[in-house]
Structure formats: C-alpha cells, structure tokens
C-alpha cells in the first residue's frame, strides 16, 4: 500500500486567490487553488493508494476576510469547516492563531466539520469536546494509521488570557513521549501533525533560533522514537526534508503549496520507503466548488474594504521598508499617534509587520488599513521602568547589523522565519542607536521630555497585546505589568481616528537616530 499524507498549514484565511491589495487582484496562492491540487492528489483513492488530508492549523485568522467574518458576519464562520470538508480533511490541528477571536468563535468555525480536531497537548479545565481528542486512528484494508495532534506550547505567551481561559498547553515533546509508544501498539503507522516548526537546521542540526520552546520539531524527532512522519507548520517555511530518517513537510503560508509525504508499506504494514515533497499551487485554477462557497461572503467583504475613511495630507506610503525602520516613517508615526490617542499615554511603539505593508494612500479606505495593519491586535498599557525601556530598545537595536559599512537586517530576524514584526519603533521618546557598538550596548541616547531616562524611572507605554506579554523575546514586558487593556481592535481604532480627524497630515518624525 502507498499512503499519501497531504497537508495544508497556515492558510491564514486566504481562501480566494487574492492578496486584497485591490478588488481585481489575482494572487498565485489561496485555499481555492489548494483545493484543486488536493482534488488531483486524491483522485486515486483505493486499497493500493490511500490519500489522507490533514489541516495543520492557523486557518481561521490572518486575512481581511477572516477579520470581516469574525467582527461583522459570524454567521459565515462555519465556512472554514465546510471548505475543509470539501477538501476531504480527515484531521485538523489547532494553530496558535485559532485562538485569536476566542473559544466560542473557534467552536463556531469548526461547527460544520466532519473530521476530528486533535489536541494531545491541550488540557481543558472545562472538558469541551473541541479539545477532547488527542489522536485519531484511520483504517483501510487492515492498515491502521494513527495521527497525533500537537500545538506549539507557546500559545499562552502570546494570546490574550480571556481567549484561552481554562486551557493549558503542555510540553509537546513530553506529550509525544507519552502518546507515541501507545499509538505504536494501536497502529501500523504513526504520524505526528504539529503546529510548530523545526528549531534546528535539518542538515547540520545547529540551532536556527532561540531555543525557547516555540518550535520543537527537531526535538520531537531526536527524542521520541517511533514517529513515521512529521507534518509541521507555524514558521511559514516550505520544507520537504528528512530528519533522523523521518520525512518532514511544511507547506508555506496563505495556500502557496501543499505538503505531501508518500509512505510505501511492506506486506507486513511496515514503512519501507518515504518521500517528502512540497507541491506549489500557482498553476492550479481555483476550485469552482470552493469558490461557490467563498464568493458570497468574499464579495460582501470587498465592498466593505472599499469603504472610505479619510484623507492623507502628504505621503504615508512605505516605499522602502528597511529605510522606514532605520529612519522612522510617517506611517509608523501615525500608528503610534492612534495608539496614544486611544490610551492617553505619551509613549507608544509599533512595527512594520512585514515588507508587504503598503502604508496609506491619499484617499484611505478600509482596504489600506487592513493591508497595512494585518493583525487583530488590541492595545495594552504597561507600567515599566527606564531599565525596561532601555532593554527593549536594545532588543530592537539587535535587528540591525553592519556589513562592509552597510546596514543589513540581522539574519536572526530573517531565518528560519521572517520576523520583521519583532522590531519596534517608538514615539514619545528621543533615542539613538550606535550600530558600531556590540549588541546590548547600542542605545547611546534615551531621553523623555528632554531629560535622560534613569534606570528606576517609572514610565507607562502603549504596546500591542502580543508585545505587552513579552512576544518576540521581550522578557522585560510581562502580563503582570499591564495596568490597562483596551477591548477594541487596532484596525477599528484607526478607523475611529479618521472619523475624528478626516484629514491626517503625514509627519516625518525626528525622535529616532541611527549612527553607523
């Protein structure tokens, strides 16, 4: 028998083939293109060739459409599980972003599913059925395949506490050590589907990121014997490799590709050979069946995206993202102004989340806001010391390196995953980086209201909830330092700001300097 383990991961709600930059945009990715590829891969389905489709999480958050459904049309939320049914998904895994809109909404998204959600390392104090199944066992022609579902244990470090109330995310390696031996007794083939990635280079085994527990795929394969195949995600990489002899896939993000691991079994139901691959979908036409489900809500959302909000006096488009991070930018200044207006603080920070952030055109619509501020962040006000602020700025300063006198982005923020969202730019303080100095000693000026900030000085700062909880390796920011949370999404705050200020003047800030 030949088993084909077909996986999607990190689709992030890109259901239709568009990046939403314009109403007529056509993008080379999407779940609708994925659906066509899956249809081709599952066409041969017999006792000789057995396709098994798994969704590996981060499905219901991340695009303007996911926001529109969650905030304006929750009756459409079952669309996600209906589409998964159409793709013949036989097991689903929770990604960290599944929790961004709370558990009631997540339950609604999964309400039409015809497949189990697997959550081996998620313990639920309230014993909800959504999290009750650690694994599933599928059987065909006497062959049993066990699929164990794991979610990155780092969810609690990022998510707003009320969104995951009662949930506990256990260590994935310890969980796998408990379950895999049992599954080996129950099944012929053991598959681990993990919404997490590889923390080590698959060829050299050298660490590729901070070993903080966010990604533990390498540890799973090094420490847990008996795994026949590992499906990964979360890092948005395209991977098809073998680690310790075990095939591993990761199919990118936004539906750019499909992962497939082919297992050839002996007559004794043992894995004889395996082959991992990533199959791009750009050449595949969008599935008419999928688009018939997607189009009604997607068309409503496109109308909503074209809602006019206000006008920019000047230029707030981001033409060079590295330059904007290096010298500050009117768009960054504007977002910080919105944050400070919403919270009443006079220090705020924000990030250019990726290099696709366009900034705002002269005539601003909801489309520009959603494409520039892509996360459903809420704001938090945190009480910190001057020492905390300096430490945070040193973390920001480590984003840059010098090569032959030229400023470059530190590879730590580029590989294995793009993490531009970890670098913040601040308003309300005056500060200077000297990139010729070592990491940890680069902040050479830090003033507040014209005076140097002292280590024990008490300050309040507005941050998004991800950063306020320490996300992005900012240990100086913690949940127990938060003194106030705002319940309103940042995109709504931006729209509200335009309602109060129909014309916004673009200002080039001068509070931040970089020497090199």
Image (spheres, rainbow, N blue to C red):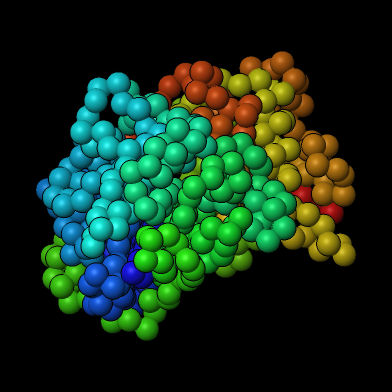
Does 509 sit above or below residue 133? below
Residue at x-position 50% and y-position 23% = 479
From the viewer's perspective, tell me whether residue 432 is left or right of residue 481: right
Q: What residue is drawn where x is 64% and y is 58%?
A: 202
Image label count: 0
The spot of residue 62 in percent (x, y) is: 37, 53
Asked if residue 240 lies left or right of residue 21, the reply is right
Please state, as top left, top right, bottom left or bottom right, where the N terminus lies in the image.
bottom left
Residue 357 in the image: state x and y as whole percent: 49, 60
Q: Position of residue 106 (x, y in %)?
A: 24, 41
- Report which quarter residue 394 is drawn in: top right
The answer to whether 30 is drawn above or below residue 360 in the figure is below
Q: Is residue 469 visible?
A: yes
Q: How far from the left and from the top, in percent, is residue 430?
A: 70, 37
Q: Residue at x 20, y 33 (%)?
A: 129
**Who's the residue at 87% across and 49% down the image?**
436
The quadrant in which the C terminus is found is bottom right
Name the residue at the front extreme.
Answer: 268
Residue 301 placement: quadrant: bottom left
- Report the front residue among 418 and 511: 418
Residue 377 found in image quarter: top left
**Residue in front for this viewpoint, 262 or 369:** 262
Q: Is residue 257 above or below residue 444?
A: below
Which residue is nearer to you in this view: 499 or 442?
442
Q: Is residue 25 visible?
A: no
């Amino acid at each position: 028998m030949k088993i084909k383990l077909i996986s999607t991961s990190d689709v992030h709600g890109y259901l239709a083939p568009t990046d939403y930059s314009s109403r007529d945009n056509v993008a080379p990715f999407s779940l609708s293109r994925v659906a066509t590829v899956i249809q081709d891969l599952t066409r041969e389905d017999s006792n000789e060739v057995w396709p098994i489709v798994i969704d590996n999480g981060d499905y219901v958050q991340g695009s303007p459409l996911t926001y529109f459904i969650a905030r304006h049309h929750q009756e459409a939320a079952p669309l996600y599980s209906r589409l998964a049914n159409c793709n013949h998904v036989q097991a689903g895994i929770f990604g960290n972003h599944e929790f961004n809109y709370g558990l009631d909404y997540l339950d609604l998204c999964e309400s039409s599913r015809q497949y189990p959600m697997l959550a081996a390392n998620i313990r639920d104090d309230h014993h909800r059925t959504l999290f009750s199944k650690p694994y599933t066992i599928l059987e065909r022609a006497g062959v049993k395949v066990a699929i164990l579902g794991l979610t990155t244990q780092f969810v609690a470090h990022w998510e707003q506490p009320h969104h995951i109330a009662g949930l506990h995310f256990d260590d994935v390696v310890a969980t796998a050590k408990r379950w895999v031996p049992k599954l080996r007794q129950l099944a012929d083939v053991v598959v681990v589907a993990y919404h997490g990635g590889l923390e080590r280079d698959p060829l050299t085994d050298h660490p590729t990121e901070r070993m903080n527990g966010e990604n533990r795929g390498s540890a799973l394969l090094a420490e847990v014997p008996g795994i026949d195949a590992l499906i990964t995600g979360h890092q948005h990489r395209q991977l098809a490799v073998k680690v310790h002899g075990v095939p591993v896939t990761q199919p990118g993000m936004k539906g750019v590709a499909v992962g497939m691991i082919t297992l050839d079994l002996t007559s004794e139901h043992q894995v004889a050979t395996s082959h991992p691959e990533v199959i791009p979908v750009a050449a595949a036409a969008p599935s008419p069946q999928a688009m018939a489900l997607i189009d009604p809500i997607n068309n409503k959302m496109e109308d909503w995206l074209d809602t006019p909000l206000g006008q920019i006096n000047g230029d707030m488009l981001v033409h060079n993202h590295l330059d904007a991070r290096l010298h500050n930018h009117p768009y960054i200044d504007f977002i910080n102004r919105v944050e400070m207006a919403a919270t009443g603080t006079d220090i705020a920070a924000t990030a250019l989340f990726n290099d696709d952030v366009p900034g705002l055109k002269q005539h601003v619509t909801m489309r520009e806001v959603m494409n520039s501020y892509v996360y459903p962040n809420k704001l938090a006000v945190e009480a910190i010391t001057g020492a905390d602020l300096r430490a945070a700025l040193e973390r920001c300063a480590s984003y840059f390196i010098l090569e032959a006198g030229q400023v470059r982005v530190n590879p730590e923020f580029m590989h294995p995953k793009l993490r531009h969202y970890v670098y913040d730019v601040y308003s309300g303080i005056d500060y200077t980086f000297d990139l010729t100095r070592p990491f940890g000693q680069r902040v050479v000026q830090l003033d507040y209201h014209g005076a140097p900030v002292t280590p024990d000085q008490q300050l309040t700062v507005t941050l998004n909830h991800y950063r306020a909880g320490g996300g992005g390796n900012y240990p100086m920011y913690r949940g127990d330092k938060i003194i106030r949370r705002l319940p309103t999404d940042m995109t709504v705050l931006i729209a509200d700001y335009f309602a109060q200020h129909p014309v916004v003047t673009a200002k080039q800030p001068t509070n931040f300097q970089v020497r090199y």
